[in-house]
Amino acid sequence: MANMPRSFLQVAATEEVASPLRVVQIEGLAILKIIKHCKEFSPALVTGQLLGLDVGSVLEVTNCFPFPIREEDEEIEAEGANYQLEMMRCLREVNVDNNTVGWYQSTLFGSYQTVELIETFMNYQENIKRCVCIIYDPSRSNQGVLALKALKLSDAFMELHRKKNFTGETLREKNLSWVDIFEEIPIKVSNSALISAFMTELEADTPVTRCDYDRLQLSTSPFLERNMEFLIECMEDLSMEQQKFQFYYRSLSRQQAQQQAWLQKRRAENAARKASGEDLLPEEDPSNPIFKPLPEPSRLESFLITNQISNYCNQVNGVAGQSFSRLYLMKALHEE
Amino acid sequence: MANEQTVLQFPLFSSSSSSSLSAKVHPLVVFNICDCYVRRPDQAERVIGTLLGSILPDGTVDIRNSYAVPHSESSDQVALDIDYHHNMLISHQKVNPKEVIVGWYSTGLGVTGGSALIHEFYSREVPNPVHLTVDTGFRNGEGTIKAYVSVNLSLGDRQLAAQFQEIPLDLRMVEAEQVGFDILKPTAVDKIPTDLEGMEASLERLLALIDDVYKYVDNVVEGHIAPDNSIGRFISDTLASVPKIPPAAFDKLVNDSLQDHLLLLYLSSITRTQLSLAEKLNTAAQIL
């Protein structure tokens, strides 16, 4: 509430031009709710809806509510929609912001880059101009990390996805590579003055009471092991994708060779016909199967896998980096 | 309200089992209550709502979630939106059936007259509900959070009054929430700390603690502070918890883990190089 005047100013300043989304500002309450929901159901993956306001280049997330775990049943799906409406109505009655700004979901070891995520995103994007997806990784909180991420799809990618066109040519035209699919948006956290006062009251500032020594835990191997396993799986998937492409290119070149051969034969035939004064045959024959264009496999899948791999690499790097500090700390302590 | 009837209280007090009851409140509940209070309707003096959670095997009431319930209050009556309460309860139970009603909360300091009526309503929903009060007005100069259970005072078969009895309250945070603690206290944080920044903060805190212990020990040795045996025992316990490993073995241990991690780093870097190389080759192949 303390930043209301600034927010209004921003609205006034940005009303003419729809500025791009720069910052996601989350209330501590929403963060706690997300953490609670994701952690309670971990390792099952859960989702929920984010509520808030869209103020200029800042997207404020002020509240959220969890979705029940989805089941493969149409009747239950309809019930889920009812639940969503009911919850929104109830929250409006107690003056909670009643505007959907996106959704949150939990993930394990950062494996969230899936086709489903993109499809959900496109669904949301149809109704809400500006939305984000908040990703929380409960498995990393054991490492003392608050693994919270705000993501959105890049505009260029969304345009491509709408056209369902992921051939190499269009990707090259748009100059889109796998890094450009997701955009990570910086997260800001805000708390109302009242909450801040209560937190100060409840938790004193001395180092004794602030036990965040989870961060100093030495055993990172289970986490790293799982990470490497996932990484290897991804590599296998990627090589499968590569094989698909190789197959495509091989059959493409074979087809082109066949076309050339056919064309030469036809030309020779035409030359013979010309010599004997007969009508010429057309140089193209659409009914011939060798002229049917081969469908190019979509690059989306391999892009996502590449993204996923680089994500795992980053995680491994991050955790290994932290482990170095831990090891040196242990060494120093032991020498003392 | 029971002050005049303290005489009646004694026989009940000894027979009641609620004296051993205690409650544990998660910070989310406090956050939620504060948020509801900030967003309360114009004319409302306080907000009330339902507390959800479970009762732990040892009898502690574990308050894990809450939602506000609209109500209106005048001097002698309280109107509670019961439909709303039930709808919200059904919705919450769809998500987490394990969380049931354990009581209700209200902002403000202490118990007021209307509270007895609301408490009676909740007593019908769940036996022995907990009443949590959060003083959002900071009337004592501090944010008092208290929990009560009600004890019925009766004379023979006649109900005379209900007395609210305070129970101990545990406000500690669980591990995951502790991690996020740094960002939950200030009114604005520009960005979420990265892994290494968090690490740095933790190390600094550890260093501060070690410094404190050093200073204390030095002061005791020099005679500035009277020695306290229990603190001394804690310190020696801590020191003894460092495992005793011969230096050669320790070095081997550290170096092995270092090498493991270096190997992982190397692997992940090589993967990344491979990826960018593959991308370059792909685009090059397409141009040809």
Image: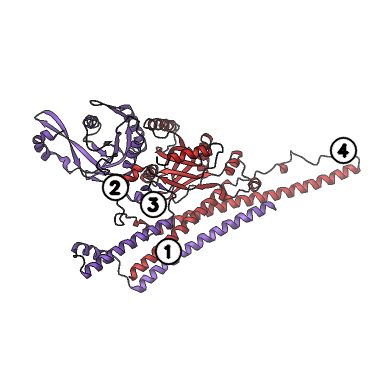
Say which label, 1 or 3, has the lower sequence index.
3
Closer to viewer: mark 4 or mark 2: 2
Say which label, 1 or 4, has the lower sequence index.
4
Crowding at mark 2 (Cα within 10 Å: few <14, some 14-19, many 20+) = few
Chain A shown in which color? Answer: red
**Residue drawn at point x = 41 percent, y = 69 percent:** B255
**Residue drawn at point x = 29 percent, y = 52 percent:** A204
Identify the chain of the residue marked 4, using the numbered disc in the image. A
Identify the chain of the residue marked 3, using the numbered disc in the image. A
Spot occupied by residue A312 in the image (x, y as percentages of width and height):
49, 54
Mark 1 secondary-structure assignment: helix
Residue under numbered circle 4: A279
Say which label, 4 or 2, has the lower sequence index.
2
Mark 4 and mark 3: span between their CA atoms?
79 Å
**Callout 2 touching callout 1 (CB < 8 Å):** no
Mark 3 secondary-structure assignment: helix
Say which label, 2 or 3, has the lower sequence index.
3
Does label 3 lie on the same chain as label 2? yes
Crowding at mark 1 (Cα within 10 Å: few <14, some 14-19, many 20+) = some
